[in-house]
């Protein structure tokens, strides 16, 4: 990995290079100073040597003078002076021996001097010892001694002088050495200072061209980024500045990307996004203004926003904007806007003041549609409320525990309360009279009522505030979603219907006994008259009797059908359900219409079948007779009516197919309703009542079966009905079969 020239390393270089150089420079100076000191020490020693040597000139003279004085005075002080001079001479010689120890030539000179001086001193000592004992002829003896010693001394003085001269000449050379040393120091200082200056300048230039220049590029990039300009190309290098520049470039790319996305969002936003100055003038407006406000965004820039407001709302809007300036939090409010095309829009404003930009940033969301929907919803709610409140049915909201939470005014009327809220909080079971004498817990009563009235009308005996009771029907349905725990209840006073039913029952009783019986008697008499049992009639009378008999027969048929239909729909017709073979039923049905088929010259075909159906055989024969006689009635002469049986899972289907006129598609669904006939003439021409299919449908549905027709105009029709077969019977016993009464009382007559 290449060495990274980091800023820290650059700083170390900037400090260390001059430092190393300065250390070298100081070391060189120390060496030179040490050299100079050594030279000075050598010079001092030379001077000391010269001084000691020069002492050696004077000391023999001092000794001689002291000796002479002693000879004359014999004074002890002269003797002491002699001794001192003598000792100093000895000391000087020792010093010189020591000083010249490392210089053999000089040591040799000093050793010779030492030998001569030691000899001279020995003689002088002898002389002094002699003159202390014998003071005679002292002067002659002194002269004798001098004669011996002076030549030696002269010789020594010469030696010393030449030695001193040599030393002095050597000493004279010293100033040159010192000068050269001080010159060297000056030169060294000059070189050192110049080198440091050059080095510092070079480092400064290097730092400026590298680091400082790149730092200024970085600063320039910062300014460019702030202004949104293109950045300088990436800097080269391997330090933190390059890293920082790299990060800066990628940051700029991310910012540019974010800015582009933000611009795209603003430009493509469905809402109008705009900025306003503190005076409410548009600074920028997103292009959505053209589609939402029908004003070009560019046109709005510089204009005051309140121009787009209805005059009465302008002041309030200005005040709102003013209150937002300098407030940090976002504010939301609604206003109306008057667009140049004259339309009025509801706008939800989200506004925030930007202190840095000194502008209000706004998002204007058009909520006109929402307002309209809200208004429509309010109106619809009001309508619904009105409907519920004026409904002639009691409506209530209750919870799963049967507690009533809300009621409509009809509830108050039904239960004779002064105020609707008297019912709120009461239990549903409190409004019903207890049916059984056993004291049943109210929770059990409630769950029974829930079971029975959930999704279907259940008859109950309701109880008013004054204790009176009335028959009512209750219907409960879940309300407000599966988890709301609420139920919607409807309660209807059925007193009137009960009255009508009672009246109808009475009427049916009258019809069945008071109308059918006489009619049957009339028909019997007419038949007797027809066959001449009551005497021969004229031809005209015979014709009239025949017509009268046919009408009486039709009337009896109509009365029977009416009674059957009523009883079937009221569930009052008893049926005996059993798993039985279908074939005998088919046989009986076909046999019953055989004469009728022969009259119409129509053949009825049917085949053996193993089918077992869960049915009341008499009622199914009644259905078969009805469908077969219709098929025969509407079949052309010479055609065939076919009876087929097919199995469809747990149901067996009986199909009666004719080749008659067929039934138009528009009538197919209504045929099973009362008195519906394809053609008006069917009642008179074909002798129908329009109740046969209604009775068939009621019978089949009580068998838990279904009935229908498939037909094509001109090609014939297939009436079919399906009954539970042995599979269905094995799976479960139909509930109605278990509950159906077993006696056959009141069973209607088969037509
Ligand atoms: P109706 O006593 O009139 O036959 P139904 O209820 O049995 O009463 O039949 C209703 C009407 O349905 C008939 O009047 C007739 O118009 C039409 N219809 C019933 N069966 C057929 C059929 N097989 N072909 C054509 N039309 C039929």
Image (tube, grey):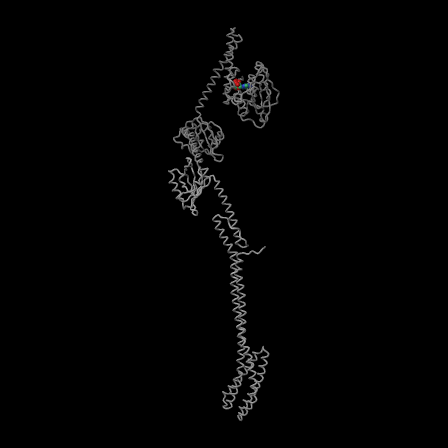
* Quadrant assignment, res 330: top left
Q: Nearer the viewer, residue 587 or 186?
A: 186
Q: Nearer the viewer, residue 671 or 741?
A: 671
**On screen, 337 above or below 549?**
below
Q: Nearer the viewer, residue 733 or 149?
A: 149
Q: Where residue 93 appears, x then y in whole percent?
A: 55, 82
The residue most toward the bottom is 136
Answer whether residue 590 is visible to the viewer in this image: yes
Q: Where residue 441 appears, x then y in whole percent?
A: 47, 32
What residue do we see at 54% from left, 56% from top? 6
**Quadrant where the C terminus is found in the figure:** top right
* Quadrant assignment, res 645: top right
**Is 396 placed left or right of 609 in the picture?**
left
**Is 367 placed left or right of 185 in the picture?**
left
**Quadrant where the N terminus is found in the figure:** bottom right
Answer whether residue 618 is visible to the viewer in this image: no
Q: Where residue 612 appears, x then y in whole percent?
A: 59, 23
Q: How many marks?
A: 0
**On screen, 544 above or below 187?**
above
**On screen, 622 above or below 252?**
above
Q: Where residue 638 appears, x then y in whole percent?
A: 59, 15
């Amino acid at each position: 990995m290449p060495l990274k020239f980091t800023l820290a390393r650059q700083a170390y270089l900037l400090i260390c290079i001059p430092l190393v150089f300065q250390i070298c420079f100081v070391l060189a100076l120390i060496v030179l100073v040490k050299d100079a000191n050594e030279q000075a020490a050598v010079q001092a020693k030379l001077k000391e040597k010269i001084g000691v040597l020069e002492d050696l000139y004077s000391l023999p003279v001092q000794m001689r003078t002291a000796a002479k004085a002693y000879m004359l005075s014999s004074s002890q002080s002269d003797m002491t002076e002699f001794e001192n001079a003598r000792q100093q001479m000895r000391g000087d010689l020792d010093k010189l021996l020591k000083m010249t120890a490392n210089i053999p030539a000089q040591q040799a000179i000093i050793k010779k001097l030492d030998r001569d001086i030691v000899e001279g001193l020995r003689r002088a000592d002898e002389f002094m010892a002699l003159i202390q004992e014998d003071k005679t002829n002292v002067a002659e003896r002194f002269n004798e001694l001098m004669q011996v010693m002076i030549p030696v001394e002269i010789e020594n003085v010469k030696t010393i002088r030449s030695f001193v001269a040599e030393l002095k000449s050597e000493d004279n050379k010293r100033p040159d050495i010192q000068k050269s040393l001080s010159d060297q120091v000056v030169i060294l200082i000059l070189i050192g200072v110049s080198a440091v200056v050059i080095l510092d300048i070079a480092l400064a230039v290097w730092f400026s061209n590298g680091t400082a220049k790149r730092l200024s590029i970085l600063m320039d990039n910062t300014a460019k980024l702030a202004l949104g300009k293109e950045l300088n190309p990436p800097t080269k290098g391997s330090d933190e500045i390059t890293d920082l520049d790299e990060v800066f470039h990628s940051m700029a790319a991310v910012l540019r990307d974010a800015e582009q996305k933000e611009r795209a969002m603003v430009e493509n936003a469905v809402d109008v996004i705009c900025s306003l100055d503190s005076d409410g003038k548009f600074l920028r407006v997103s292009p959505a203004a053209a589609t939402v406000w029908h004003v070009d965004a560019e046109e709005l820039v510089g204009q005051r926003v309140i121009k787009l407001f209805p005059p009465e709302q302008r002041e309030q809007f200005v005040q709102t904007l003013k209150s937002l300036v300098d407030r940090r939090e976002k504010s939301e409010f609604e206003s109306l806007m008057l667009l140049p095309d004259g339309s009025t829009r509801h706008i939800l404003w989200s506004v925030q003041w930007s202190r840095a930009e000194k502008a209000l940033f706004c998002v204007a969301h058009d909520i006109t549609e929402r307002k309209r929907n809200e208004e429509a919803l309010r109106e619809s709610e009001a309508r619904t409320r009105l409907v519920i409140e004026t409904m002639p049915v009691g409506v209530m909201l209750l919870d799963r525990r049967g507690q009533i939470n809300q009621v409509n005014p009809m509830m108050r009327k039904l239960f004779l309360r002064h105020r609707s809220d008297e019912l709120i909080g009461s239990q549903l079971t409190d409004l019903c009279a207890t049916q059984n004498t056993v004291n049943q817990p109210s929770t059990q009563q409630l769950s029974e009522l829930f079971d029975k009235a959930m999704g279907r009308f259940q008859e109950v005996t309701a109880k008013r505030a004054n204790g009176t009771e009335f028959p009512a029907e209750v219907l409960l349905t879940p309300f407000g979603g599966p988890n709301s725990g609420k139920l919607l209840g409807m309660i209807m006073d059925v007193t009137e219907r009960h009255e009508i039913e009672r009246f109808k029952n009475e009427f049916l009783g009258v019809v069945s006994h008071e109308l059918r019986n006489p009619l049957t008697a009339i028909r019997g008499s007419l038949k007797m008259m027809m066959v001449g049992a009551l005497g021969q009639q004229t031809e005209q009378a015979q014709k009239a009797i025949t017509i009268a008999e046919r009408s009486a027969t039709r009337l009896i048929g109509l009365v029977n059908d009416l009674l059957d239909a009523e009883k079937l729909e009221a569930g009052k017709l008893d049926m005996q359900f059993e798993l039985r073979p279908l074939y005998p039923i088919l046989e009986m049905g076909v046999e019953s219409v055989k004469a009728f088929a022969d009259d119409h010259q129509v053949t009825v075909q049917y085949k053996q079948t193993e089918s077992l159906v869960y049915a009341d055989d008499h009622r199914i024969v009644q259905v078969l007779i009805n469908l077969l006689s219709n098929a025969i009635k509407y079949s052309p002469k010479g055609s065939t009516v076919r009876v087929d049986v097919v199995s469809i899972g747990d149901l067996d289907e009986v199909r009666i197919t004719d080749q008659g006129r067929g039934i138009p598609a528009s009538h197919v669904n209504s045929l099973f309703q009362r008195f519906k006939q394809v053609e008006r003439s069917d009642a008179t021409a074909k002798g129908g009542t329009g109740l046969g299919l209604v009775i068939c449908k009621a019978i089949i549905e009580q068998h838990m079966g279904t009935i229908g027709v498939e037909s094509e105009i001109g090609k014939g029709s297939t009436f079919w009905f399906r009954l539970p077969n042995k599979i269905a019977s094995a799976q479960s016993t139909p509930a109605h079969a278990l509950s159906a009464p077993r006696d056959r009382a009141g069973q209607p007559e088969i037509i």
